[in-house]
Amino acid sequence: MSIAKPVMRNLLEAATKKEIAATFGIATAAGVAWYYAVLNRRKHNYANFYKNYDSEAEFQAMVKLGVFDSVTATGEITAEKWE
């Protein structure tokens, strides 16, 4: 009985094919997992936020806080900012 010789011919090519296939499979699985775990949840959260969002009420709250330079806290437009 003799020991079988190792297969050395086209070894790099065969190993590279296996690694590319494994990499493609892992990347595809990671992409699908990211889509369902993160992106779908994020889309759902944004949809719920904008379903209940009142932009006018948010604007009025910012005006009362004095966030804008061109509008006073009482809601009056300041003319000197427009000139």
Image (spheres, rainbow, N blue to C red):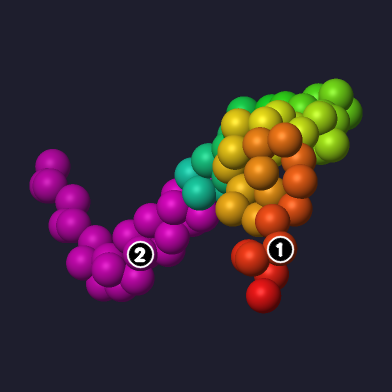
Look at label 2 and name its amino acid: Thr
Q: Position of residue 59 (x, y in %)?
A: 75, 38
Pointer 1 local density, CA inside 10 Å: few below 14, some 14–19, many at least 20: few
Q: Is residue 33 left or right of residue 74?
A: left
The residues colored magenta run 1-25
> Farthest residue toward the left?
2
First in residue order: circle 1 vs circle 2: 2
The label on residue 79 is: 1
In the rendered image, which quarter is residue 75 located in? top right
Look at label 1 and name its amino acid: Ala
Q: Specify the principal SS of the magenta part.
A: helix
Q: Residue at x 16, y 57 (%)?
A: 5
In the rendered image, which quarter is residue 36 located in? top right
Q: Is residue 41 left or right of residue 6?
A: right
Q: Position of residue 63 (x, y in %)?
A: 69, 38
Secondary structure of residue under mark 2? helix
Name the residue carrying label 2. Answer: 16
Q: Nearer the viewer, residue 37 or 52?
A: 52
Q: Is residue 79 magenta?
A: no
